[in-house]
Image (cartoon, helix red, strand yellow):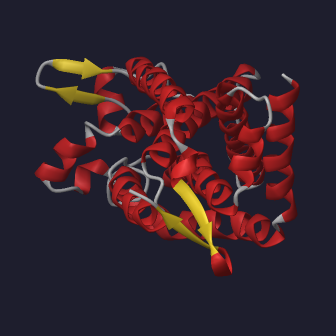
Amino acid sequence: MRIIAALWFRNVKLFARNRVQLVLMFIMPFFYLYLLSTIFKSAYISNPIHYVLAGIVIIVVFQTSLNIATSTIDDIVSGYMKEILVSPVKRIQIAIGQILSSTTIATFQGILILIVGYFIGMRYTSLLTPIAIIASMILIGLVFSSFGLFIATCVKNAQTFQIVSIAVTTPITFLCGVYVPLSLLPNGLAILALFNPMTYATAFFRTLSLEKMSLSQDQLLAEQLAFQIGHFFITPQMSIILVLLFGILFLMLSTIAFTKVDFSLIKRANGHKDIFQQ
């Protein structure tokens, strides 16, 4: 536990020291809030501002969670990861420390946005709702931190990683209903969105944040908080189960991949450049 706590504290401290990131973290979500609320009005969403805000919170949690991939690659390139591996530390402890720190930062950012959202009218009728919201952010953060770590351990070349990262995260981000209502997507993209785990994470989080768990099936479909595939109806509760199954899968895959990856394939050359041997 001491090793996990040390890795967790290091990554959280690095985040807290990045003041530019902290400032942008406050500015960018509310820029998107102003921009996207007008788009969602055309999708006949009731209370589009709060609807969009909930989506922005969960996409921030998603993107921050995936930053574990970038930080892991940076640690590999800088040689920090090699220094840790020289010590008698189990790799699974390193993986857990990376995942927990990424989840903590992601949840913290989500909470800060929700606090500001309180001052623009986002209220809850039950005291249990904020607790459930924080728990769901932690869960979703763990899921996509595991996914990010899996990407980092599978793609060790820094240049290749940037390409793969963009290729993976871009469709996930834009096909989940946060930036563009799913009802406005072309039929082909709308079908692809149903294979996107972030679609279900977004739908559940919005339903929970807006306290709309008790809506009827027709109302949930109209609000794009539930989905219908043929005669099969995916409720918000089923959505979070799908996200959980996705998370369990990639938690296992990421820890297995991290424990088996060969960091000795990376050598430092003169000028502090990294040569990745294939």
Q: Residue furthest bottom?
A: 271
Q: Is residue 135 above or below residue 159?
A: above
Determine the residue positioned at 80% across, 40% down.
7
The percent coordinates of residue 90 (x first, y second) are 71, 26
Residue 112 falls left or right of residue 222 = right
The N terminus: image quadrant: top right
Q: Is residue 151 visible?
A: yes
The percent coordinates of residue 112 (x first, y second) are 77, 50
Q: Is residue 210 visible?
A: no
Determine the residue positioned at 71% across, 39% down.
85
The percent coordinates of residue 269 (x first, y second) are 61, 72
Toward the viewer: 27 or 87?
A: 87
Residue 58, quarter of the rendered image: top right
Determine the residue positioned at 17% across, 27% down.
229
Toward the viewer: 69 or 139?
A: 69
Determine the residue positioned at 52% across, 42% down.
262
The percent coordinates of residue 106 (x first, y second) are 68, 45
Residue 232 falls left or right of residue 16 = left
Residue 21 falls left or right of residue 223 = right
Please count the marks in the image.
0
The C terminus: image quadrant: bottom left
Q: Is residue 220 above or below residue 38?
A: above
Q: Is residue 233 above or below residue 174?
A: above
Toward the viewer: 10 or 139?
A: 10
